Image (tube, rainbow, N blue to C red):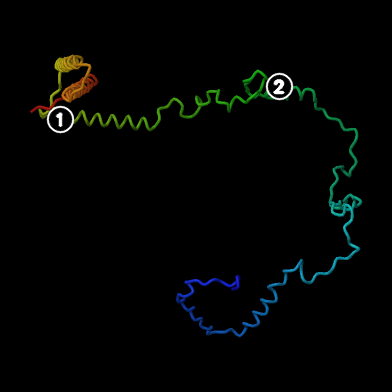
């Protein structure tokens, strides 16, 4: 038995599907052979080392020493351009012997007196080594005091105050109308003090009861009672704060 022969396999006994039939192309271009020939001629043109048709290098042009270094262009003699250039020296001869009556000393004194002295640039030093920095962009100067709108009330605050004033006037007119109709009543100062005193006494009673609770609250009834006292005290505190903050209180009438 040959060792290289493949061993028998049960999968070879199974029927295999036939490969699909490949139908021939219906259309054949007339230029197909020309295109195929041109493609085959250029397909393997550059597979060798270098181009297929290259002239051999000349042995005279071999690499020399310092041949790859950059060379300066050849120096040409400089010629002064004469045409088209105007010389600063006048062609006419200067007139000699002219004198002026101007007193240059007095003119210089007047110029110095009329000139404005240069102001020093403001600086500040923040290190012991004397490092200087400009003072104006540092933020140390009160430059915002000299802006255009400094000291004026902003427009949005004026608008908000007007809206609040208008809303207060509308509310006062509404209250006045309801008082005239008899549906609202203004509490006097004595009545307000009596209501406030009664609320504070109720809060003191609840606080006394709350302070008398046991330290160990382990039952459901104790927890509910404690929560009930806390809610009542909180509600009384809100009412007391409301009455203390408002001087005029209106109440509806039946």
Q: What is the residue that sits farthest to the front in this orientation?
A: 1
In this rendering, would 169 be left or right of 17? left
Position of the C terminus, as image quadrant, is: top left
Q: Is 134 left or right of 224, judged from the image as shown?
A: right
Residue ID at (67%, 76%): 40
Q: Secondary structure at mark 2?
A: helix
The crowding category of the residue bearing disc 2, from other C-alpha atoms within 10 Å (few below 14, some 14 to 19, many at least 20), is few
Can see residue 247?
no
Q: Quadrant of residue 31?
A: bottom right
Is 91 drawn above or below residue 185 in the view shown?
A: below
Inter-mark Cα distance, 2 to 1: 80 Å
* Residue drawn 40% across the image and 27% down it: 153
Q: Nearer the viewer, mark 2 or mark 1?
A: 1
Q: Nearer the viewer, residue 18 or 215?
A: 18
- Residue visible at 15% across and 30% down in the picture: 177
The total number of labels drawn is 2
Q: Quadrant of the N terminus?
A: bottom right
């Amino acid at each position: 038995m040959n060792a290289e022969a493949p061993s028998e396999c049960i999968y070879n006994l199974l029927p295999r599907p036939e490969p699909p039939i490949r139908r021939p192309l219906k259309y054949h271009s007339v230029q197909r052979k020309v295109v195929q020939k041109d493609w085959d001629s250029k397909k393997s043109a550059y597979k060798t080392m270098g181009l297929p048709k290259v002239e051999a290098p000349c042995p005279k042009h071999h690499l020399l020493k310092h041949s790859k270094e950059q060379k300066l262009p050849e120096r040409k003699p400089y010629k002064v351009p004469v045409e088209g250039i105007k010389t600063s020296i006048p062609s006419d001869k200067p007139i000699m012997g002219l004198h002026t009556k101007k007193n240059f000393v007095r003119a210089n004194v007047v110029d110095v007196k009329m000139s404005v002295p240069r102001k020093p640039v403001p600086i500040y030093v923040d290190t012991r080594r004397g490092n200087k920095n400009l003072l104006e962009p540092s933020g140390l100067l009160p430059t915002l005091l000299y802006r255009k709108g400094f000291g004026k009330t902003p427009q949005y605050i004026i608008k908000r105050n007007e809206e609040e004033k208008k809303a207060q006037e509308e509310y006062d007119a509404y209250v006045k109308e309801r008082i005239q109709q008899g549906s609202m009543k203004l509490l006097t100062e004595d009545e307000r003090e009596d209501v406030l005193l009664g609320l504070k006494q109720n809060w003191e009673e609840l606080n006394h009861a709350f302070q008398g609770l046991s330290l160990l609250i382990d039952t459901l009834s104790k927890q509910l009672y404690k929560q009930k006292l806390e809610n009542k005290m909180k509600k009384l505190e809100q009412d007391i704060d409301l009455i203390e903050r408002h001087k005029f209180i209106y109440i509806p009438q039946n």
